[in-house]
Image (cartoon, helix red, strand yellow):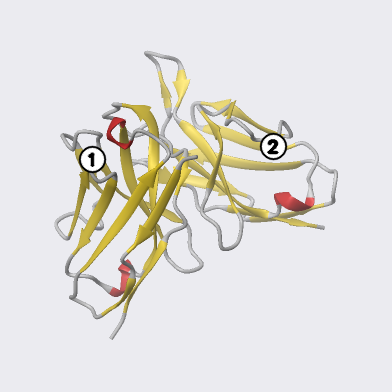
Amino acid sequence: DIVMTQSPDSLAVSLGERATINCKSSQSVLYSSNNKNYLAWYQQKPGQPPKLLIYWASTRESGVPDRFSGSGSGTDFTLTISSLQAEDVAVYYCQQYYSTPLFGPGTKVDIK
Amino acid sequence: EVQLVESGGGLVQPGGSLRLSCAASGFTFSSYSMNWVRQAPGKGLEWVSYISSSSSTIYYADSVKGRFTISRDNAKNSLYLQMNSLRAEDTAVYYCARDPTIFGVAHSFFDYWGQGTLVTVSS
């Protein structure tokens, strides 16, 4: 079974600074037949359901600010918030859908 | 506007049963696969079950297989989760979540989520 890990567990970033979250899968989630990485990112604020940010590792969901970007391939992925805003305080989860859906443990982002 | 509204949560004793519902609106429900995803208090997200648009394909997480049953009624735009033999570790907020692939039969990401319904299993 695929195992998902995220790092760091939490981070505090100053307003306007860059936040970088890493996600690693124990097996590649790149499907060779279509060259797509089956990896998504979500944002969850307290008391709210998760919100889809990124899918296919780097495709931004409609309406998501362009300060959010996803990168990576195979087993190693990154979510970058280029200029942290106060409303970005949340827990961020990666999810693989190459096989049975599995989420990473989450990364909490706070303001420094 | 896509809306997913869960209901049916509550307090139940270990070994008991509960049926969750998810009312969908704002999209052609019968064209989309649906899922249940849960989140234990203060914990991360766990996918629970998947059902394709026509109910022809169903998947369960190992943790609920044999105890939970997913179903849908496309005429009523509703998704269900029948939960039997409940355990303390089933305590969680249960979300219904839409698979964005029209007539898909494989796992995917989730583009719309309901607000969730809390299930508490305790004596």
Classify B62 as above or below A40.
Answer: below
- Rendered image quadrant of residue A21: top right
- In front of the other: B40 or A51: A51
- In front of the other: B51 or A94: B51
Total numbered circles: 2
Lateral position of residue B24 relative to residue A107, left or right: left
Instruction: Give the Cα separation between the discs numbered 2 and 1.
Output: 39 Å
Lateral position of residue B37 relative to residue A92, left or right: left
Residue B69 location, x and y as percent? 18, 54
Q: Quadrant of the C terminus of chain B?
A: bottom left
Marker disc for residue B54: none
- Whether residue A26 appears in this view of the structure is no
Residue at mark 2: chain: A
Read off the residue under disc 2: A80
- In front of the other: B80 or A93: B80
- Whether residue B77 appears in this view of the structure is yes
Q: Nearer the viewer, mark 2 or mark 1?
A: 1
Residue B30 location, x and y as percent? 27, 34
Residue B67 location, x and y as percent? 17, 60
Lateral position of residue B115 relative to residue B21, left or right: right
Residue A13 location, x and y as percent? 79, 51
Tell me if mark 2 has few (under 14), some (14-19) or many (20+) residues whose alpha carbon lies within 10 angstroms of its own. some
Read off the residue under disc 1: B74
Q: Secondary structure at mark 2?
A: strand
Residue at mark 1: chain: B
Q: Secondary structure at mark 1?
A: loop
- Rendered image quadrant of residue A48: bottom right
Tell me if mark 1 has few (under 14), some (14-19) or many (20+) residues whose alpha carbon lies within 10 angstroms of its own. some
Q: Amino acid at mark 1?
A: Asn
- In front of the other: B93 or B23: B23
Q: Residue at x 34, y 51 (%)?
A: B23
